[in-house]
Image: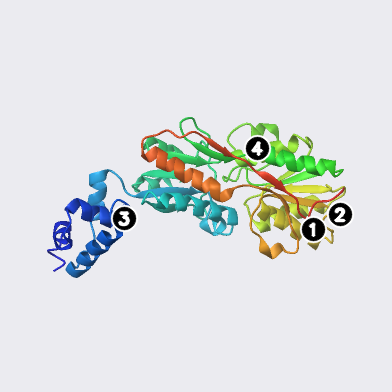
Amino acid sequence: MSDRATLSTVAARAGVSSSTASLAFAGSPRVAPATVERVLRAADELGYAGPNPVAASLRTGRSGVVGAVVGERLLYAFRDPVAVQLLDGLTEELGTLGVGLLLLAGDSMRSGPTPAQLGRLALDAAVFATCGLEDDAAFRLLQARQVPLVAVEGPVVPGVPLVGIEDRDGTAELARHLAELGHRDAAMVAMPLRLDGRRGPVDDTRLAAGVYRGTRERLLGLRSVFPDATVVETAANSIEEGERAGVALLDRSPRPTAVVAQSDLLAAGVLRAAAALGLAVPGDVSVAGFDGADLPWLEPVRLTTVVQPTTEKGQAAGRAVAALLSGQVPDDVVLPVRLRLGTTTGPA
């Protein structure tokens, strides 16, 4: 029976038009739930699995797939509650469009998908979900293919809608909080400026261009209050990297009285380093982060941090995709952040 079943025969058995049956399979809200159930029951009786997605994409010019470019291995992305929360917000919005999300990540050798991988994929749009750089090969290839693009925190390119947060202002507010507590010697544990292995002293030359927007803006926010702050750049956004950087900053004399980490995961690593060195927080050193991530295993410690609206950031990226697919050009979005005081900062 399944060899002869078609959308038309399913529609005839269900007592609807072929166009209504097609909309029912697509999950369109324009079809009443009872009608959808009748169509699906007829399809089941006839052994019809549904319209051929390849044929459908040829008719509509759409694949029903949006790519999310993750600038690191999924192992690291899924250990970061902020990345997971952002992707959740993105899929929440894309679900209303009836499209799926395809994660495009790197491997142990690369910070993102290869051009060969991207060249084989039919994408309706792509979101650079965990930052991107203007000279990224994947970004240039998708641009050349005229795939609609949305950038979350970067790349910053004219014509590509950007969804960002107040990175600089939020970090500057945190820095002023530390200054008001009497701190004069603050340091920063920074996320990677790039993921291509180019590391070294973080000076103004390296901050000029070609680095991740969020990393740069958070550093500039700290230096607006502590212009001589020491900066240690990490190789990845992880607790282990935060601990390594924390030891480098705290196991010396004189040591900074406050350490600002560019993420809560890095801050958790600094807390681990302080404990290993026998330093009290905040008695010997104040520690603060950025993100407002859910880290229940830190309790009863409450990290002082800058809270960003991560889910809303993902949702804003999803709405930008929807606008692009409907032929609109969405405006850039910059979402506010807020300082949340905890138990890890105190007087110098």
**Direction left: furthest residue:** 4
- Give the mark nearest the N terminus, 1 or 2: 1
- In the rendered structure, are the residues bearing label 3 and label 4 in contact, judged by CB atoms less than 8 Å apart? no
Residue 27, label in figure? 3
Q: Secondary structure at mark 1?
A: helix
In space, the residues marked 4 and 2 are separated at their CA atoms by 28 Å
Q: Nearer the viewer, mark 1 or mark 2?
A: 2
Q: Secondary structure at mark 2?
A: loop
Where does label 2 land, which residue? Answer: 284
Point out the image quarter for the N terminus.
bottom left
Residue 24 falls left or right of residue 185: left
Type of amino acid under label 1: Ala
Give how far across and how far down residue 109 sits, in percent: 52, 52
Type of amino acid under label 2: Asp
Residue 274, label in figure? 1
Q: Nearer the viewer, mark 1 or mark 3?
A: 3
- Give the mark nearest the N terminus, 1 or 3: 3
Residue 18 in sight: yes
Where does label 4 land, which residue? Answer: 217
Residue 54 falls left or right of residue 78: left
